[in-house]
Amino acid sequence: MTLPDAYPFPTDPNRDLPAGGTIPERYYKSIVRPFGDAGLEFETLVRNGWVAIDVKGEPPREPNRPVTLRLYRTPPDAPFAAEIEIQAVLLPAEITAGDWLDLYVENTGHERLRGDAPTGLPGQPADWLVRSASGAERFVFRLTAARQGPRLYLISGRVAEAGYGELAEAFAVVLFTFKPLGAPSGSFAERVRAEAFGKRLVLHPLDWTAEAPQEKLEKGMSGLALKRRQAGQVAGFIAVQAFAKVQFPRIGPLDLIALAKENLEQDAGVAFAETDEPRALGLAHFPFEGLLVNASGMRGDADAEVRIAALEDEETRYLVYVLGPSRRAAGTACALNRGAFDLLLREFRPAQGSAR
């Protein structure tokens, strides 16, 4: 039996949920306030008979150290022993849920069975199915990570390999009904700075510096360059450009994406190898749907990664792109660049009423 047949996994997020989209009576609502901390309170639906295990300890205080908030275990007479663990992690920097989980799985040495690579869509949760061996018995884990402000929730379901098919629904219900009820103590995982950019603000981590573009801009254009340096070298680059619709009425989203690639080829020496199809990008602070493109290639003898976003409001079209090493070339540096790009898009809101 091949892996696609042996391990059901929701390409459609609702695939493992009960038919009809309704949760049957065999599940109960569990509301938990870990360590008496209202900020960590959450709710989720758990299958009847599963035992809730209280844990002792303290809320997460050190970055990148997961703290268990609650365990749920199958009853003693269940055909397969399984558990679901809900943890919270303080993030060390602005990093997406997808990149954090990607690095976590790599560090644990688990074998990846199913899951999508981080997509670049802002705020998107991450979901992986992995397998590990423990002695003579092999286990399958369903791992889901989602951000809330400066922290990340990691929800993992664990069962012996033979029992995953029977418990896929129980894992899926917990994952997709999990809801934080408490408010995080802040919006960001690290200190950020706001740069005025026309009628909007550009937010970035403090270790990125803002510079005016070197080239002379035409009337109706404006630009901003962000750079992150490491050991004296530029390890990440983000460009933000704006085009007034009055002066540039015929420039569309695909034209902006082509312009970004041209700039990177001519100015940064990027030789593109693959460019994904554009995906729809909906952001809360923009009235129109934008486009997001991921691309890869070479810069000199190093693997490079590019992400490009084309956005627009009533008056202006915006082009935002990030260049840095690929995940394969430098995993942590790639995650930091993606995190800064994600932060910029999430918070690229009108200056009036913007978070600071």
Image (cartoon, rainbow, N blue to C red):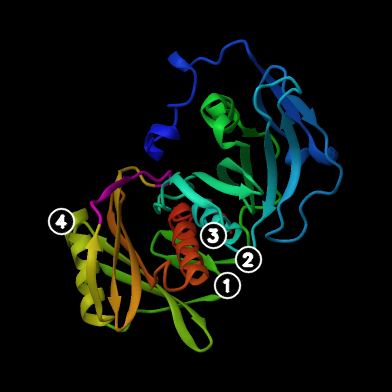
Task: Say whether disc 2 or disc 3 marks the residue closer to the N-terminus.
Answer: 3
At x 40%, y 46%, the residue is: 283
| Vertical position of residue 93 compared to residue 181: above or below | below
Between circles 3 and 4, the one closer to the viewer is 3
Relative to the observer, which residue lies in front, 134 or 263? 134
Q: According to the image, label 1 marks what residue?
A: 206
Q: According to the image, label 2 marks what residue?
A: 191
Q: According to the image, label 4 marks what residue?
A: 249
Secondary structure of residue under mark 4 = loop
Alpha carbon distance from label 1 to label 3:
28 Å
Secondary structure of residue under mark 2 = loop
Is residue 183 visible from the viewing direction of this image?
Answer: no
The residues colored magenta run 276-285
Labels 1 & 2 near each other (Cβ < 8 A): yes
Amino acid carrying mark 1 in the image = Leu
Q: According to the image, label 3 marks what residue?
A: 106
- Residue 198 numbered mark, or none: none
